[in-house]
Image (cartoon, helix red, strand yellow):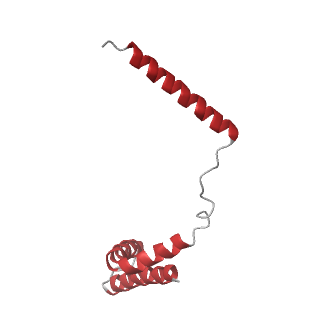
């Protein structure tokens, strides 16, 4: 509901800016371009709280949020990790024994 309210406010800002430009005598394609830019800027400045509510509402209903889990390592991955760890520790031990004292 917050997203729809925020969208409605933004549309009203654009239409309001277009109405004021129409009354000021601008009656062309340029009127709509200026109205859209003006409405976007006004909504960014004046609608901070509705924008935050809309973003929070969208984030709360993220369908992919439940699917984001850490994958469980399988046996092959665990064995590979242990081989790499043992190889690295062997290399570290060799380097330490070769250092001059």
Which residue appears at 45% of the width and 80% of the height?
A: 6
Which residue appears at 39% of the width and 71% of the height?
A: 33
**Residue situated furthest right in the rendering:** 75
Count of labels in the image: 0
Quadrant assignment for the C terminus: top left
Front-most of 26 and 52? 52
Position in image of residue 77 (x %, y %): 64, 38
Position in image of residue 25 (x %, y %): 32, 83
Q: Is residue 64 above or below residue 40?
A: above
Q: Is residue 68 left or right of residue 34?
A: right
Position in image of residue 57 (x %, y %): 51, 76
Front-most of 97 and 62? 97
Q: Quadrant of residue 92?
A: top left
Front-most of 33 and 56? 56
Which residue appears at 30% of the width and 84% of the height?
A: 24
Q: Quadrant of residue 13?
A: bottom left
Position in image of residue 5 (x %, y %): 48, 84
Q: Is residue 34 above or below residue 76?
A: below
Q: Is residue 76 left or right of residue 45?
A: right
Q: Is residue 96 above or below residue 41?
A: above
């Amino acid at each position: 509901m917050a997203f729809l309210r925020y969208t409605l406010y933004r549309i009203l800002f654009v239409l309001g800016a277009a109405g004021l430009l129409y009354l000021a005598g601008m009656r062309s394609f340029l009127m709509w371009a200026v109205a859209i830019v003006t409405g976007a800027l006004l909504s960014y400045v004046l609608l901070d709280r509705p924008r935050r509510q809309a973003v929070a509402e969208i984030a709360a209903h993220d369908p992919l949020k439940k699917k984001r889990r850490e994958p469980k390592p399988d046996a092959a991955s665990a064995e590979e990790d242990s081989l790499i760890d043992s190889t690295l520790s062997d290399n570290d031990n060799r380097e330490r024994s070769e250092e001059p004292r």
